[in-house]
Image (spheres, rainbow, N blue to C red):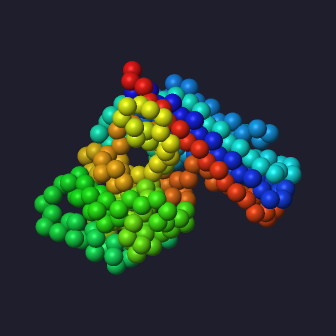
């Protein structure tokens, strides 16, 4: 499948700021499930650093504007050829050991409700494979947190989402990571794009899911929001310990000012 991406992010500041420094994870990772046909990231007026690959195998680029700034616009456009690998991340070179992803953050710390959810999902599964256990955890998260836009916000933790009893893809991914840690399985947060329209019509969606490391298979993606493993409708951008760590755009504003954010993501699909 060929997926075409148009992703625009604009920040407007009420009063000019002295400058902006951003770190971008906006270039798809290299792996067997996706191949870049064309790709560009444009930030008018900015100094673009060299694109480099970090220890997790993800592409990162530093961007800066050293002048009075009233707005910044990041435009991503590209075309990616995707194939279905049943969620298994193959051909992705990285140096960080899987056990490093047993470390939780404030956003992925398991509270009593998360521990109870994981333990209930795995009850009687002592002889099950790690793959079966991971699927059960993902299904349990999907059932426990119905998808409800607006139920949470960008800084909601896994524990807070469980208290709310609903959430969006970010919450599903972070709760699943916390559940995987309870089951002693390394897990991480993945950001990317999803074309959710089967007929290939334009669909507005950036997306997030979790990857769990399974002996014999390696990293396997689980999208609790859609009750599936990532397939040819997904583009993987980058990974991290949680939503903040894996964010496609992270930044520092020099000089305080009230800001507004506008994001538009459109994915179009075509069969090969």
Q: Is residue 40 left or right of residue 79?
A: right
| Residue 97 or residue 130, whichever sits in front | 130
Placement of the C terminus among the 4 image quadrants: top left
- Residue occupying the point 36% across, 35% down: 198
Question: Where, quadrant-wise, is the N terminus in this rendering?
Answer: top left
Q: In this view, does 271 lie above or below 18?
A: above
Q: In this view, does 118 lie to the left or right of 158?
A: left
Residue 242 vertical position relative to residue 28 in the rendered view, above or below = below
Residue 119 picture location, percent across and down: 24, 71
Q: Is residue 53 visible?
A: no
Q: Position of residue 231 (x, y in %)?
A: 34, 38
Horizontal placement of 255 versus 236: left or right? right
Residue projecting furthest to the bottom = 112
| Coordinates of residue 150 in the picture (x, y in percent) | 49, 62
* Residue at x 31% of width, y 66% of height: 144
Residue lying furthest top: 272
């Amino acid at each position: 499948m060929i997926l075409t991406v148009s992703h625009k992010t604009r920040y407007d500041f009420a009063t000019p700021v002295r400058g902006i420094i951003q770190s971008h994870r906006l270039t798809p990772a290299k792996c067997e499930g996706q191949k870049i046909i064309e790709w560009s990231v444009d930030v008018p007026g900015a100094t673009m650093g060299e694109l480099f690959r970090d220890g997790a195998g993800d592409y990162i680029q530093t961007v800066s504007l050293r002048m009075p700034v009233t707005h910044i616009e990041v435009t991503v456009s590209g075309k990616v050829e995707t194939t279905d690998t049943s969620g298994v991340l193959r051909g992705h070179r990285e140096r960080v050991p899987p056990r490093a992803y047993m470390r939780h953050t404030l956003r992925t710390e398991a509270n009593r409700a998360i521990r109870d959810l994981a333990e209930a999902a795995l009850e009687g599964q002592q002889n099950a494979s790690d793959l079966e256990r991971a699927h059960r955890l993902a299904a349990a998260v999907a059932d426990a947190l119905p998808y409800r836009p607006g139920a949470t916000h960008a800084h909601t933790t896994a524990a807070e989402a469980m208290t709310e009893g609903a959430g969006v893809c970010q919450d599903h991914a972070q709760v699943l990571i916390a559940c995987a840690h309870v089951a002693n399985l390394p897990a991480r947060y993945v950001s990317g794009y999803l074309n959710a329209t089967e007929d290939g019509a334009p669909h507005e969606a950036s997306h997030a899911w979790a990857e769990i490391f399974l002996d014999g298979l390696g990293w396997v993606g689980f999208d609790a929001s859609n009750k599936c493993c990532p397939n040819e409708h997904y583009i993987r951008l980058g990974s991290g310990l949680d939503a903040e760590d894996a964010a496609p755009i992270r930044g520092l504003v020099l000089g305080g000012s009230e800001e507004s954010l506008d994001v538009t993501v459109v994915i179009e699909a075509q069969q090969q």
